[in-house]
Amino acid sequence: ESYDLAGHDTYMHKEICEQADAVDRVLRGRIEDRFSTVHLGGLNLDAREARAVRRVKILGCGTSYHAGMIGAQLIEELARVPADAEPASEFRYRNPVVDPDTLYVAVSQSGETYDVLAAVQELKRKGARVLGVVNVVGSAIARETDGGIYVHAGPEVCVVSTKCFTNTVVAFGLLALHLGRIRDLSVADGRRVIEGLRRLPDQIAEMLRGEDAIRTLAKEYAHARSMMFIGRVRGYPVAREAALKLKEVSYIHAEAYPASELKHGPLALIEPEVPTVAIVPDDELLEKNRAALEEIKAREGRILAVAHRRQDKADHTIVVPRSEPELDPILMGIPLQLLAYHTALELGRDIDKPRNLAKSVTVE
Ligand code: G6P
């Protein structure tokens, strides 16, 4: 992959379109079929050390923080190790309790974000073990951490992150699988997740072929006053990242909420000029999500669902291919990157360099 636009009008579009190949790269050479697990050579964590981990704490900023939120869910689901993600800046300013049995993971596309680097340095000073999930090889965070996983997304030029987000989530899938298979994740489940990961590049390519329909949807929603993004559990970080992407490139105000929290406040905002994007996978929470769609419809809110099949309560549905449930967030995020992109295009924004934002924030 190169730094030229290769026929695209923006780097954002180019990078969205590179995701099938990028995911292929993060998987390449890491799957160990014989044991239904993965080999992560750079972790510097032997099986005994990995088993001794009692908790995982993930630190990042912006889009990387959102990737970490999904990563924490993957680790809890597949490895049954308590895990959570926190913005690195919050973590470093609250004098956190640093626990020797916790594995800390710093996430960063650039590997240079100051808040993340400062959190890593503070953790190291206190004797913690810190891994990096980083894109840029040899970057400051990659150098300061004890080991980690390179996400191999290739160069990302657009200020807003797309392909690196997807690859980072896949990298967390690999870490979760690894931690799971040295614990209680069965061979069968390991195999199931591996097969799910292997299907991703083709499924991403298939989704990207549906770009025309998303362009049409973007025209429909581009003049919204504000947009609400909702999801539940696996869908919630997807909603957060999609709202962030829309804000960054289109400057439309967007809020993300867990679907269950709607009734505790944001429902007051729902009206025809404030459409909702709802993440509705066909998982164990489908009925709950449908109930939320009904509540929105009852307030005359317009709904765009991202789902595995058409949702009759929604005005529009973007149908995404089925994956293993744990991997749903990976595919569900991709059409919403295209939605943000086409909305910004419709509004004539400076897509690759949104106002007031920088690709990496290397100062405090
Ligand atoms: C900046 C960028 C974001 C990015 C964040 C973290 O705010 O505008 O797109 O998500 O930094 O960057 P990192 O390189 O650490 O992932």
Image (spheres, rainbow, N blue to C red):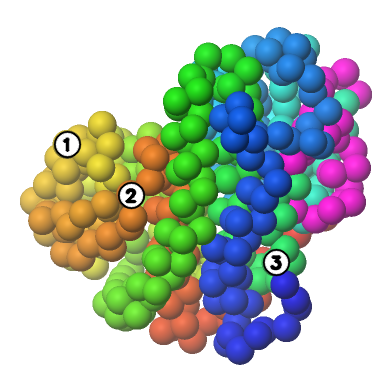
Q: CA distance from mark 1 to mark 2?
A: 17 Å
Q: CA distance from mark 2 to mark 3?
A: 28 Å
- Report helix, strand or loop for mark 3: loop
Residue at 66% of width from left, 68% of height from top? 159
Residue at 33% of width from left, 49% of height from top? 322
The disc at residue 303 is none
Say which amino acid is labelled 2.
Arg
- Circle 3 residue: 156
Which comes sooner in the sequence, label 3 or label 1?
Answer: 3
Q: Nearer the viewer, mark 1 or mark 2?
A: 2
Say which amino acid is labelled 1.
Glu
Q: Is residue 278 above or below residue 18?
A: above
- Report helix, strand or loop for mark 2: loop
- Circle 1 residue: 287
Region rendered in magenta = 125-149
Residue at 43% of width from left, 77% of height from top? 342
Q: Nearer the viewer, mark 2 or mark 3?
A: 2
User: Quadrant location of residue 19?
Assistant: bottom right
Q: Is residue 184 above or below residue 19?
A: above
- Circle 2 residue: 322
Which comes sooner in the sequence, label 1 or label 2?
Answer: 1
